[in-house]
Amino acid sequence: MFVVVHAEVDYRSPAHYGDRLIVETVVSDMTSASFTFSHVIRERESQRVVVEGSARLAAVNGSGKVKRLDKALITVLRSSPTRSH
């Protein structure tokens, strides 16, 4: 189970009903118990950035206590494209 421990969002430009949007998501950071998804949402035709944001998720057990990430999950997250800062 995962909980969101931090989230940020920056609205860069408006999107309108009917706009076709592209959502790009990468794993931008990882520790032994958490990882961060970074997102960029663009308008499809112009490539204009609409939103940039991130969310840090922590692994927790059934009691809500932080636990280490599963090794299989770490492998999957590491195989995903990453973005350097």
Image (tube, rainbow, N blue to C red):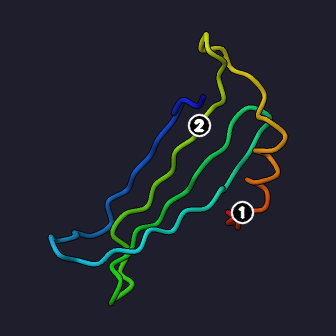
Using the image, tell me which numbered label, if any, was put on residue 63: none
What amino acid type should be assigned to the residue bearing mark 1?
Answer: Ser
Farthest-out residue, top: 63
Residue at 51 percent of width and 35 percent of height:
6
Side (left or right) of 44 relative to 30: left
The C terminus: image quadrant: bottom right
Q: Residues within 10 Å of mark 1 (few under 14, many from 20)?
A: few
Specify the quadrant that holds the N terminus.
top right
Query: Whole-Å distance between the Cαs marked 1 and 2?
Result: 16 Å
Outermost residue toward the left in this view: 17
Q: Is residue 5 above or below residue 16?
A: above
Residue 28 appears at what percent x and percent y? 66, 56
Image position of 48 (left or right of 28): left
Q: Earlier in the sequence, mark 1 or mark 2?
A: 2
Q: Which residue is mark 2?
A: 57
Residue at position x 51%, y 68% from top? 24
| Foreground residue among 35 and 79 | 79
Mark toward the viewer: 1 or 2: 1
Q: Secondary structure at mark 1?
A: loop
Residue 26 sits above or below residue 36 on the image: below
Residue position for label 1: 80
> For numbered disc 2, what is the local secondary structure?
strand
Q: Badge 2, how many Cα within 10 Å: few under 14, some, many 20+?
A: some
